[in-house]
Image (cartoon, helix red, strand yellow):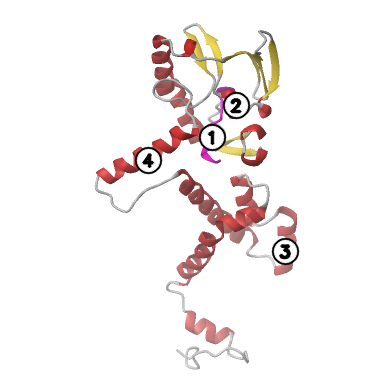
Amino acid sequence: MRVSEWASVVLPELPAYDRRRGFFTCELADACAKGGYGHKYWMPRSALRGVLGYVEVARAAAVRRAQAAGRYERIANRRIVLATHGTHSVTMSSADGGSQKEKWNDVGPQTRMLLFRRTSQGLEPVALWLNEDGLPRDIGGWEHTFDVANERIESLGLENFSCTAHMLRHSFALRWYAVGKLIKYARLGHLTDDEQRDFREEVGNTWHLVQTMLGHRSVETTKTVYLEPFQTLEVEALLAHADGFPVTSFMADVFAEHPWVRTDPLAVAR
């Protein structure tokens, strides 16, 4: 997910934790997705456990501080969540003093930052991510987080290293491209070229896996934006597999009779 999309998630959209599951399927709202293209995303159990730990400790402490300071009552145009209906819809107060029911899919980031629920301790934001002062964290806050982290790393003496949210997205894509390739080789290595082509036509190729994981509407976007690192990966993976492999004798054996290929004539004998 893009950092702006992850920043828009609200508490009712989090899945229920189940330690028997390895990952959880979630939905990104159209109103919060780039280009209005909402899509599924998958959260590993370890990630959900970390998020819930944040909710119970650091987030809860920030909420208590904000409640004690009366910050939430001073927010103009705030909306009160009157009821939630699973992870799909919400009933909230309206500007005319009434109520309205909306699908979470149609509630955009700005409205989400103004949503609060009433608890026994007072008002609490519905937004998942909060600043230390207890107020909902916008996209600028996340960029600041990376800036501060980079400064901290530099102060520790680690030179020529920095990270941005988009770098992490590229790293994520590269990882899943590699995973997809390894799975493909493991599952399809015994198939003929025609059988592999039939399989790709039926379930898609590695690019479609990465497209789905990144939430792109078109696989061409995935190829265009992330092509160069993947090309490098293909070459480096090939070189890694070739390390220690008798390439010279292999080439001489396979292409000995090929009219367009010149190999070492003594390689087979050696």
Specify start and end residues of the magenta stretch as a single range. 1-13
Mark 1 → mark 4, Cα distance in angstroms: 18 Å
Residue 22 visible in the shown view: no
Helix, strand or loop at label 3? It is helix
Q: Residue at x 63, y 50 (%)?
A: 211
Task: Specify the amino acid type for callout 3.
Answer: Arg
- Which label lies toward us, 4 or 2? 4
Which is in the foreground here, disc 3 or disc 4? 4
Q: Is residue 208 magenta?
A: no
Dot 1 alpha-carbon crowd within 10 angstroms: few under 14, some 14 to 19, many 20 or more? some
Q: Which residue is mark 2?
A: 13
Secondary structure under the numbered disc 1 in the rendered image: helix
Assign a secondary structure to mark 4. helix
Helix, strand or loop at label 2? It is: helix
How many discs mark residues in the rendered view?
4
Q: Which residue is mark 1?
A: 6
Residue that label 4 marks: 147
Q: Residues within 10 Å of mark 2 (few under 14, many from 20)?
A: many
Q: Earlier in the sequence, mark 1 or mark 2?
A: 1
- Please indicate whether residue 197 sits to the left or right of residue 41 in the image: right
Residue 153 in view (yes/no): yes
Q: Nearer the viewer, mark 3 or mark 1?
A: 1
Closer to us: 225 or 229: 225
